[in-house]
Amino acid sequence: MIYKDSGIQFDVNAQSKQSISTHIQYSTQDIGTAKITFKLMKDGVPLPISNATHGKLFMKFADGSHFYVHTEVGDALAGVIFYVLTPEQMKHFGTVQAELYVNYDNGQNMSIHKFSFEIDQALVDADIVPLAEYYIEDFEALKTLVEEKAAHADNILDELQKKFAELNNVETKDGAQAKANKAEANAKYYTDQHAANKENPHAVTKAQVGLSNVENMKQASKIDFDTHNQDSTRHITSTDRMKWDGSQLTKISNDTGGVLVSIGDTDDLYLKIVQSGKRFGTFYCSGKAKNSPSPHSSRGIFHMTGTDEKGLGTYGYVIALDWKNNLYTNYIDQTEGWQGWQRSLSTSDLSPEWNAATLINGAKQDSAFPLQFSVNNNVLWLRGSFSSLPAIGTIVAKFTIKLSRLVDFVVPTIGSYGIARFSLTTDGELRYDGIMANDNASVTRVSFNVGIPLW
């Protein structure tokens, strides 16, 4: 089926909200295609729609017509319901005032929101005027209705004639007033006598009026009442009330102090964050989740400052800290999407300290200039030397640092002028690849003083 589908998102809460103009406009020629879709959110997540949940829509049209209808379920888990306007309803052009309700089988009811939309009269329908109360299909029906009204008028005329005939039996105004004055005087005398009788003429007992059920409580004196009324500790001031009323109402954690959004192994972090809409919040993410910043579980905060027509976050940032104390950041832009995770360098990443390199496979440290390494500003620095060069292709050292690609470099030889070639692999292995000197036999050692980018 083809529809003119208009989506509206409502947040189910008790905050003050005015009727909104949705800027939705249909035409009287949108017969069977005018569809309104509602997405219901509660506490930042979709409101589930079960078999015990019934969405109802009340519509008041510009000509005074009223319709109270049931909606249909679009996506129960996503809180989506919809209603397609009937051909009869589309005849009532003008501004439509509406309100959406949700009723439950247990007797609970909720008003979701008031809103309005427009039905524009198509040019082809310009001469059609809808009837608000009833619709006459042909002349015979009109004739029948007129005859019924005429018969009703005859009955009213007969009744009036009977009433006029009875007026001859009605007494005069003065006679009726005299009787009324006498009755009033008799009643006043009786009530005055009864009110003056203090002897309990009706013999009413304490049990009859329930005095035994009344507690004999002492009432506060005027002084005690004034003291209580002026107690500023028990009673807030108007300034305090304004502070409370003006406070931020959006939660950043759940009701027990935990995270607002939990992202499991099979979830997508990007999707879960944008589904929270426009808000500031906290989250937990498994290291196995899609688009997780780290292979380790992490916790962090997010702030979405804009949403699209579906209520999904469009602009904002995310900050995550994994349990290894690595800090990551990310940003989403509506036009460019997610920018990707960036890890912030820590003090250990930027440490200028030199550390001794552990040589393997027969390579030996030079006693005067031992081989050392340091990582500074995302660059691996090597300095020092080792002697007793091994066979070509031998791994002489292995670092825990990983590179994005293989790096080849040369260092000078000592003892005879020349160079020695080395490679640092993506696994962090330092490999000896050969030597070229004036006299290879005279080379006593090689000397490192080189920086290797790690990005």
Image (cartoon, grey):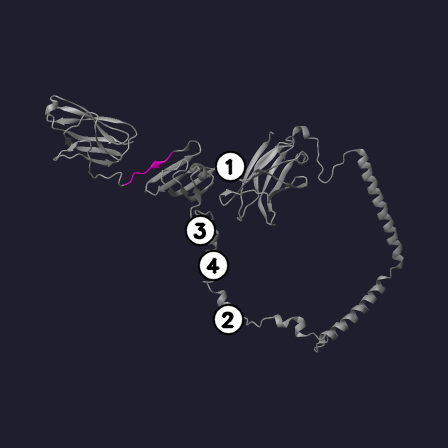
Circle 2 sits in a helix, a strand or a loop, which is it? helix
Identified at 60% across, 40% down, the residue is: 116
Q: How many marks?
A: 4
Question: Secondary structure beneath disc 4?
Answer: loop
Q: Are marks 2 and 4 in contact (CB under 8 Å)?
A: no
Q: Which residue is mark 2?
A: 223
Q: Which mark is residue 292?
A: none
Q: Amino acid at mark 3?
A: Thr
- Mark earlier in primary sequence (1, 3): 3
Q: Earlier in the sequence, mark 3 or mark 2?
A: 2
Task: State which quarter of the image contains the N terminus.
Answer: top right
Which residues are the magenta region? 340-346
Residue 225 lies, with reference to residue 296, above or below; the image says: below
- Residue located at (43% from left, 44% from top): 281
Residue under circle 4?
237
Q: Amino acid at mark 4?
A: Thr
In the displayed structure, 337 sits above or below 254; it is above
Label 4 – label 3 distance at C-alpha: 30 Å
Q: Closest to the observer: 187 or 29? A: 29
Q: CA distance from mark 2 to mark 4?
A: 21 Å
Three-letter code for the amino acid on which mark 1 is drawn: Lys
Residue 13 position within the rendered picture, expressed as x and y whole percent measured from the top left: 53, 47
Residue bearing mark 1: 310
